[in-house]
Amino acid sequence: GVREAYGDAALYDLCLRLAERLPASQIVHVPFMLYRRRSRDRSVTWQDTLSANRLSALQDALARRKLPATIDRHASASTLPRIRLQPARCPKTTLVIATRNHADLVRPCITSLREQTRYENYGITVIDNQSDEPELLDYLADLSHQGTVRVHRYDKPFNHSEMHNEAIAGLDSKYVVLLNNDVWGFSEGWLEELVATAESDETIAAVGAKLLYPDNTIQHAGVILGIRGRPFHGQRELPQTSDGYCGRANALQEYSVVTAALVLLRRDAYLQVRGFDSQMFPTSYNDVDLCLRLRQAGYRCIYNPSVQAYHFESKTRGRSPLEDEYCRRLAERWPKHVNYDSFYNPNLSSRHAFRTELRRVSSEELAARLQAAKA
Protein backbone atom coordinates (compact mmCIF):
# COMPACT_ATOMS: atom_id res chain seq x y z
CA GLY A 1 0.00 0.00 0.00
CA VAL A 2 0.90 3.68 0.37
CA ARG A 3 3.97 4.29 2.52
CA GLU A 4 3.49 7.58 4.33
CA ALA A 5 7.20 7.85 5.10
CA TYR A 6 7.72 9.10 1.55
CA GLY A 7 5.54 12.14 2.23
CA ASP A 8 4.66 14.03 -0.95
CA ALA A 9 6.16 11.18 -3.00
CA ALA A 10 4.06 8.40 -1.44
CA LEU A 11 1.97 7.83 -4.59
CA TYR A 12 5.07 8.10 -6.78
CA ASP A 13 6.73 5.40 -4.67
CA LEU A 14 3.59 3.25 -4.98
CA CYS A 15 3.60 3.57 -8.78
CA LEU A 16 7.25 2.55 -8.94
CA ARG A 17 6.57 -0.55 -6.85
CA LEU A 18 3.50 -1.45 -8.90
CA ALA A 19 5.56 -1.16 -12.09
CA GLU A 20 7.99 -3.73 -10.70
CA ARG A 21 5.24 -6.29 -10.09
CA LEU A 22 2.98 -5.86 -13.10
CA PRO A 23 3.78 -6.91 -16.68
CA ALA A 24 3.97 -4.04 -19.13
CA SER A 25 0.77 -5.23 -20.82
CA GLN A 26 -1.16 -4.37 -17.64
CA ILE A 27 0.06 -0.76 -17.51
CA VAL A 28 -1.77 1.50 -19.94
CA HIS A 29 -2.38 5.18 -20.52
CA VAL A 30 -5.94 6.40 -21.00
CA PRO A 31 -5.79 9.44 -23.33
CA PHE A 32 -9.07 10.95 -22.23
CA MET A 33 -9.87 13.77 -19.84
CA LEU A 34 -11.04 11.86 -16.77
CA TYR A 35 -10.87 14.66 -14.22
CA ARG A 36 -10.50 18.41 -14.02
CA ARG A 37 -10.43 20.90 -11.19
CA ARG A 38 -10.74 24.61 -10.58
CA SER A 39 -7.43 26.46 -10.66
CA ARG A 40 -7.97 27.71 -7.12
CA ASP A 41 -8.24 24.14 -5.83
CA ARG A 42 -4.76 23.46 -4.42
CA SER A 43 -5.56 20.05 -2.96
CA VAL A 44 -3.82 18.46 -5.93
CA THR A 45 -0.88 20.30 -7.46
CA TRP A 46 1.72 19.62 -10.11
CA GLN A 47 5.10 19.63 -8.43
CA ASP A 48 7.29 22.29 -9.99
CA THR A 49 10.38 20.96 -8.25
CA LEU A 50 11.85 17.52 -7.71
CA SER A 51 11.44 16.90 -3.98
CA ALA A 52 13.91 15.04 -1.79
CA ASN A 53 11.22 12.42 -1.18
CA ARG A 54 10.84 11.73 -4.90
CA LEU A 55 14.59 11.40 -5.30
CA SER A 56 14.65 8.99 -2.37
CA ALA A 57 11.80 6.91 -3.81
CA LEU A 58 13.55 6.70 -7.16
CA GLN A 59 16.89 5.77 -5.59
CA ASP A 60 15.18 2.99 -3.62
CA ALA A 61 13.48 1.73 -6.79
CA LEU A 62 16.79 1.51 -8.65
CA ALA A 63 18.32 -0.34 -5.70
CA ARG A 64 15.44 -2.83 -5.64
CA ARG A 65 15.92 -3.42 -9.35
CA LYS A 66 19.68 -3.81 -8.84
CA LEU A 67 20.45 -1.09 -11.39
CA PRO A 68 23.74 0.74 -10.70
CA ALA A 69 23.04 4.44 -11.16
CA THR A 70 23.51 7.86 -9.66
CA ILE A 71 20.67 10.36 -9.44
CA ASP A 72 20.71 14.11 -9.14
CA ARG A 73 18.53 17.05 -10.11
CA HIS A 74 18.39 17.82 -13.80
CA ALA A 75 20.26 20.99 -14.68
CA SER A 76 17.52 22.41 -16.91
CA ALA A 77 14.35 20.48 -15.99
CA SER A 78 13.31 21.16 -12.39
CA THR A 79 10.73 18.36 -12.29
CA LEU A 80 12.99 15.65 -13.76
CA PRO A 81 15.73 13.54 -12.19
CA ARG A 82 19.03 13.09 -14.02
CA ILE A 83 19.65 9.34 -13.99
CA ARG A 84 23.17 8.22 -14.88
CA LEU A 85 23.09 4.49 -15.50
CA GLN A 86 26.26 2.45 -15.20
CA PRO A 87 26.70 -1.08 -16.59
CA ALA A 88 27.41 -3.80 -14.04
CA ARG A 89 29.35 -5.55 -16.81
CA CYS A 90 31.07 -4.33 -19.95
CA PRO A 91 30.03 -6.74 -22.73
CA LYS A 92 31.84 -6.46 -26.03
CA THR A 93 30.43 -3.64 -28.16
CA THR A 94 31.31 -2.71 -31.74
CA LEU A 95 30.92 0.78 -33.16
CA VAL A 96 30.03 0.64 -36.86
CA ILE A 97 30.55 3.61 -39.20
CA ALA A 98 29.67 3.47 -42.90
CA THR A 99 31.21 5.86 -45.41
CA ARG A 100 32.11 6.49 -49.00
CA ASN A 101 35.08 8.88 -49.05
CA HIS A 102 34.73 11.97 -46.79
CA ALA A 103 37.87 11.82 -44.72
CA ASP A 104 36.83 15.30 -43.58
CA LEU A 105 33.95 13.68 -41.66
CA VAL A 106 35.32 10.25 -40.78
CA ARG A 107 38.54 11.58 -39.22
CA PRO A 108 36.83 13.86 -36.64
CA CYS A 109 34.26 11.15 -35.93
CA ILE A 110 36.86 8.50 -35.12
CA THR A 111 39.15 10.97 -33.35
CA SER A 112 36.24 12.04 -31.16
CA LEU A 113 35.36 8.41 -30.43
CA ARG A 114 38.90 7.55 -29.39
CA GLU A 115 39.28 10.62 -27.23
CA GLN A 116 35.86 10.57 -25.55
CA THR A 117 35.12 6.86 -25.08
CA ARG A 118 36.27 5.29 -21.81
CA TYR A 119 34.36 2.04 -22.15
CA GLU A 120 36.69 -0.89 -21.58
CA ASN A 121 35.51 -3.38 -24.21
CA TYR A 122 34.77 -1.82 -27.60
CA GLY A 123 36.05 -1.92 -31.16
CA ILE A 124 35.47 0.15 -34.30
CA THR A 125 34.44 -1.22 -37.71
CA VAL A 126 34.33 1.08 -40.74
CA ILE A 127 32.23 -0.01 -43.69
CA ASP A 128 34.01 1.32 -46.79
CA ASN A 129 31.61 1.67 -49.72
CA GLN A 130 33.83 1.92 -52.80
CA SER A 131 35.88 4.86 -51.54
CA ASP A 132 38.42 6.26 -53.99
CA GLU A 133 39.58 9.27 -52.00
CA PRO A 134 43.32 8.85 -51.31
CA GLU A 135 43.15 10.73 -48.01
CA LEU A 136 40.46 8.43 -46.60
CA LEU A 137 42.07 5.24 -47.94
CA ASP A 138 45.43 6.19 -46.40
CA TYR A 139 43.76 7.09 -43.11
CA LEU A 140 41.87 3.79 -42.89
CA ALA A 141 44.96 1.80 -43.90
CA ASP A 142 46.94 3.48 -41.12
CA LEU A 143 44.26 2.80 -38.49
CA SER A 144 43.88 -0.78 -39.69
CA HIS A 145 47.65 -1.34 -39.47
CA GLN A 146 47.60 -0.01 -35.89
CA GLY A 147 44.80 -2.40 -35.01
CA THR A 148 42.55 0.53 -34.09
CA VAL A 149 39.92 -0.04 -36.77
CA ARG A 150 38.63 -3.03 -38.70
CA VAL A 151 37.61 -2.20 -42.28
CA HIS A 152 34.71 -4.01 -43.94
CA ARG A 153 34.72 -3.54 -47.73
CA TYR A 154 31.34 -3.20 -49.41
CA ASP A 155 32.08 -3.15 -53.14
CA LYS A 156 28.55 -2.55 -54.44
CA PRO A 157 26.34 0.46 -55.18
CA PHE A 158 25.21 2.29 -52.05
CA ASN A 159 22.69 0.31 -50.00
CA HIS A 160 22.81 1.45 -46.39
CA SER A 161 20.74 -1.50 -45.19
CA GLU A 162 22.61 -4.28 -46.94
CA MET A 163 26.07 -3.03 -46.04
CA HIS A 164 25.14 -2.95 -42.36
CA ASN A 165 23.53 -6.37 -42.50
CA GLU A 166 26.73 -7.81 -43.98
CA ALA A 167 29.03 -6.14 -41.47
CA ILE A 168 26.94 -6.91 -38.38
CA ALA A 169 26.53 -10.58 -39.35
CA GLY A 170 30.31 -10.93 -39.20
CA LEU A 171 30.71 -9.48 -35.71
CA ASP A 172 30.82 -11.37 -32.41
CA SER A 173 29.89 -8.55 -30.00
CA LYS A 174 26.76 -8.47 -27.83
CA TYR A 175 25.95 -4.90 -28.81
CA VAL A 176 26.44 -2.88 -31.98
CA VAL A 177 26.39 0.91 -32.12
CA LEU A 178 25.53 2.38 -35.51
CA LEU A 179 27.04 5.79 -36.16
CA ASN A 180 26.70 8.12 -39.12
CA ASN A 181 30.08 9.33 -40.30
CA ASP A 182 29.07 12.92 -39.49
CA VAL A 183 28.58 12.37 -35.74
CA TRP A 184 31.12 13.68 -33.24
CA GLY A 185 31.51 15.37 -29.85
CA PHE A 186 30.21 12.65 -27.53
CA SER A 187 29.07 13.31 -23.97
CA GLU A 188 31.02 11.91 -21.03
CA GLY A 189 30.27 8.25 -20.39
CA TRP A 190 28.11 8.06 -23.52
CA LEU A 191 28.81 4.40 -24.33
CA GLU A 192 28.55 3.25 -20.73
CA GLU A 193 25.07 4.79 -20.51
CA LEU A 194 23.92 3.25 -23.79
CA VAL A 195 25.07 -0.20 -22.69
CA ALA A 196 23.67 0.22 -19.17
CA THR A 197 20.28 1.18 -20.59
CA ALA A 198 20.15 -1.97 -22.70
CA GLU A 199 21.50 -4.10 -19.84
CA SER A 200 18.75 -2.87 -17.52
CA ASP A 201 16.17 -5.09 -19.26
CA GLU A 202 16.57 -7.85 -21.83
CA THR A 203 13.51 -6.60 -23.73
CA ILE A 204 15.38 -3.42 -24.72
CA ALA A 205 16.82 -3.90 -28.21
CA ALA A 206 17.52 -0.31 -29.31
CA VAL A 207 18.77 2.71 -27.37
CA GLY A 208 18.89 6.12 -29.02
CA ALA A 209 20.53 9.39 -28.02
CA LYS A 210 19.87 13.11 -28.04
CA LEU A 211 21.52 14.43 -31.19
CA LEU A 212 22.36 18.10 -31.66
CA TYR A 213 23.04 20.36 -34.59
CA PRO A 214 26.33 22.29 -34.44
CA ASP A 215 24.38 25.37 -33.27
CA ASN A 216 23.31 23.46 -30.10
CA THR A 217 19.71 22.93 -31.14
CA ILE A 218 18.07 19.50 -31.01
CA GLN A 219 18.12 17.33 -34.12
CA HIS A 220 16.78 14.12 -32.55
CA ALA A 221 15.05 13.39 -29.25
CA GLY A 222 12.96 10.42 -30.32
CA VAL A 223 10.82 9.88 -33.43
CA ILE A 224 7.07 10.48 -33.56
CA LEU A 225 5.06 8.61 -36.18
CA GLY A 226 2.08 10.01 -38.03
CA ILE A 227 2.94 13.71 -38.16
CA ARG A 228 1.58 14.66 -41.58
CA GLY A 229 1.79 10.98 -42.42
CA ARG A 230 5.55 10.74 -41.87
CA PRO A 231 8.03 9.93 -39.11
CA PHE A 232 9.04 13.18 -37.45
CA HIS A 233 11.61 14.35 -34.90
CA GLY A 234 9.25 15.92 -32.42
CA GLN A 235 11.60 18.23 -30.46
CA ARG A 236 13.59 19.31 -33.50
CA GLU A 237 15.34 22.71 -33.45
CA LEU A 238 14.56 23.42 -29.80
CA PRO A 239 17.53 24.67 -27.73
CA GLN A 240 19.73 21.92 -26.29
CA THR A 241 18.64 22.80 -22.74
CA SER A 242 14.92 22.95 -23.56
CA ASP A 243 12.61 20.57 -21.70
CA GLY A 244 10.48 20.12 -24.79
CA TYR A 245 6.88 19.04 -24.40
CA CYS A 246 6.24 18.18 -20.70
CA GLY A 247 9.95 17.50 -20.21
CA ARG A 248 10.12 14.77 -22.86
CA ALA A 249 13.28 16.13 -24.46
CA ASN A 250 15.11 15.40 -21.19
CA ALA A 251 13.27 12.29 -19.97
CA LEU A 252 14.51 8.71 -20.19
CA GLN A 253 11.58 7.01 -21.94
CA GLU A 254 10.28 4.50 -24.45
CA TYR A 255 9.55 5.49 -28.05
CA SER A 256 8.25 3.57 -31.04
CA VAL A 257 11.33 4.60 -33.03
CA VAL A 258 14.78 6.10 -32.47
CA THR A 259 17.10 7.22 -35.24
CA ALA A 260 19.94 4.99 -36.46
CA ALA A 261 22.27 7.98 -36.82
CA LEU A 262 23.45 6.96 -33.35
CA VAL A 263 21.81 3.89 -31.88
CA LEU A 264 22.89 0.93 -29.78
CA LEU A 265 21.36 -2.37 -30.94
CA ARG A 266 21.20 -5.74 -29.22
CA ARG A 267 22.89 -7.81 -31.94
CA ASP A 268 20.96 -11.03 -31.38
CA ALA A 269 17.66 -9.15 -31.59
CA TYR A 270 18.84 -7.42 -34.78
CA LEU A 271 19.68 -10.78 -36.34
CA GLN A 272 16.44 -12.31 -35.07
CA VAL A 273 14.40 -9.83 -37.14
CA ARG A 274 16.89 -10.18 -40.05
CA GLY A 275 18.30 -6.70 -39.70
CA PHE A 276 17.41 -3.87 -42.04
CA ASP A 277 15.16 -4.59 -45.00
CA SER A 278 17.59 -3.96 -47.84
CA GLN A 279 14.98 -4.53 -50.55
CA MET A 280 12.14 -2.32 -49.33
CA PHE A 281 14.23 0.29 -47.48
CA PRO A 282 17.79 0.43 -48.84
CA THR A 283 18.27 4.00 -47.53
CA SER A 284 15.55 6.16 -45.99
CA TYR A 285 13.24 4.91 -43.22
CA ASN A 286 15.11 1.64 -42.78
CA ASP A 287 15.61 2.53 -39.10
CA VAL A 288 11.87 3.21 -38.66
CA ASP A 289 11.00 -0.15 -40.19
CA LEU A 290 13.65 -1.91 -38.07
CA CYS A 291 12.38 -0.41 -34.81
CA LEU A 292 8.79 -1.38 -35.64
CA ARG A 293 9.83 -4.95 -36.43
CA LEU A 294 11.81 -5.13 -33.18
CA ARG A 295 8.70 -3.95 -31.32
CA GLN A 296 6.60 -6.50 -33.19
CA ALA A 297 9.01 -9.18 -31.93
CA GLY A 298 8.47 -8.04 -28.33
CA TYR A 299 11.42 -5.69 -27.90
CA ARG A 300 11.48 -2.05 -26.86
CA CYS A 301 13.20 1.11 -28.11
CA ILE A 302 14.47 3.57 -25.48
CA TYR A 303 15.55 7.19 -25.77
CA ASN A 304 18.28 8.22 -23.31
CA PRO A 305 18.78 12.02 -23.34
CA SER A 306 21.88 11.76 -21.15
CA VAL A 307 23.74 10.41 -24.18
CA GLN A 308 24.47 13.33 -26.48
CA ALA A 309 26.49 14.02 -29.62
CA TYR A 310 26.57 16.42 -32.55
CA HIS A 311 25.22 15.41 -35.95
CA PHE A 312 25.27 17.27 -39.25
CA GLU A 313 22.36 15.05 -40.48
CA SER A 314 22.63 13.71 -44.02
CA LYS A 315 25.48 16.05 -44.86
CA THR A 316 27.19 13.32 -46.87
CA ARG A 317 24.46 12.23 -49.25
CA GLY A 318 21.56 14.61 -48.67
CA ARG A 319 17.94 13.55 -49.01
CA SER A 320 17.13 10.59 -51.22
CA PRO A 321 14.96 11.48 -54.25
CA LEU A 322 13.08 8.24 -53.49
CA GLU A 323 12.14 9.29 -49.96
CA ASP A 324 8.48 9.77 -50.87
CA GLU A 325 8.41 6.25 -52.27
CA TYR A 326 9.98 4.81 -49.11
CA CYS A 327 7.42 6.71 -47.03
CA ARG A 328 4.65 5.15 -49.12
CA ARG A 329 6.13 1.70 -48.54
CA LEU A 330 6.32 2.37 -44.83
CA ALA A 331 2.66 3.35 -44.71
CA GLU A 332 1.73 0.27 -46.70
CA ARG A 333 3.62 -2.08 -44.37
CA TRP A 334 2.69 -0.35 -41.10
CA PRO A 335 -0.68 1.36 -41.71
CA LYS A 336 -1.73 1.34 -38.05
CA HIS A 337 1.61 2.62 -36.76
CA VAL A 338 2.47 5.42 -39.16
CA ASN A 339 -0.76 7.23 -38.34
CA TYR A 340 -1.20 6.34 -34.66
CA ASP A 341 1.92 6.27 -32.55
CA SER A 342 1.53 4.39 -29.26
CA PHE A 343 3.79 6.95 -27.55
CA TYR A 344 2.06 10.06 -28.83
CA ASN A 345 -1.14 11.26 -27.20
CA PRO A 346 -4.03 11.13 -29.72
CA ASN A 347 -5.33 14.45 -28.37
CA LEU A 348 -2.26 16.16 -29.82
CA SER A 349 -1.97 17.43 -33.37
CA SER A 350 -1.22 15.11 -36.29
CA ARG A 351 0.08 18.12 -38.21
CA HIS A 352 2.45 19.71 -35.69
CA ALA A 353 4.26 17.51 -33.17
CA PHE A 354 3.39 18.07 -29.50
CA ARG A 355 0.82 20.76 -30.18
CA THR A 356 -2.87 20.80 -29.42
CA GLU A 357 -5.26 21.31 -32.30
CA LEU A 358 -7.79 24.12 -32.16
CA ARG A 359 -10.73 21.92 -33.07
CA ARG A 360 -13.20 19.75 -31.25
CA VAL A 361 -12.40 16.03 -31.45
CA SER A 362 -15.40 13.76 -31.06
CA SER A 363 -15.32 10.94 -28.54
CA GLU A 364 -15.89 8.54 -31.46
CA GLU A 365 -12.78 9.80 -33.29
CA LEU A 366 -10.71 9.64 -30.11
CA ALA A 367 -11.92 6.11 -29.41
CA ALA A 368 -11.03 5.06 -32.98
CA ARG A 369 -7.52 6.53 -32.66
CA LEU A 370 -7.03 4.84 -29.30
CA GLN A 371 -8.17 1.49 -30.70
CA ALA A 372 -5.79 1.86 -33.65
CA ALA A 373 -2.91 2.72 -31.32
CA LYS A 374 -3.62 -0.41 -29.23
CA ALA A 375 -3.72 -2.55 -32.34
Image (cartoon, helix red, strand yellow):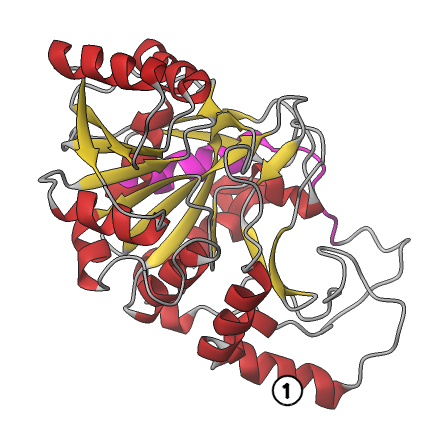
Can see residue 284? yes
Image-quadrant location for residue 314: top right
Side of 97 relative to 256 (left or right): left
Quarter of the image containing the N terminus?
bottom left
Q: Is residue 56 positioned above or below 282 on the image?
A: above
Residue 75 placed where, x, y %?
61, 22
Q: Is residue 3 positioned above or below 177 on the image?
A: below
Side of 63 relative to 79 (left or right): left
Q: Residues within 10 Å of mark 1 (few under 14, many from 20)?
A: few
Q: Which residue is mark 1?
A: 368
Which residue is depicted at the point 49% across and 25% down? 309
Question: Could you tell me which secondary element the residue under label 1 belongs to?
Answer: helix
Start and end of the magenta stretch?
44-66
Can see residue 196? no
Which residue is depicted at the point 58% across and 36% down? 250
Residue 15 placed where, x, y %?
47, 56
- In front of the other: 78 or 123: 123
Side of 184 relative to 321 (left or right): left
Total number of numbered discs in the rendering: 1
Image-quadrant location for residue 80: top right
Residue 69 placed where, x, y %?
34, 29
Side of 154 relative to 257 (left or right): left
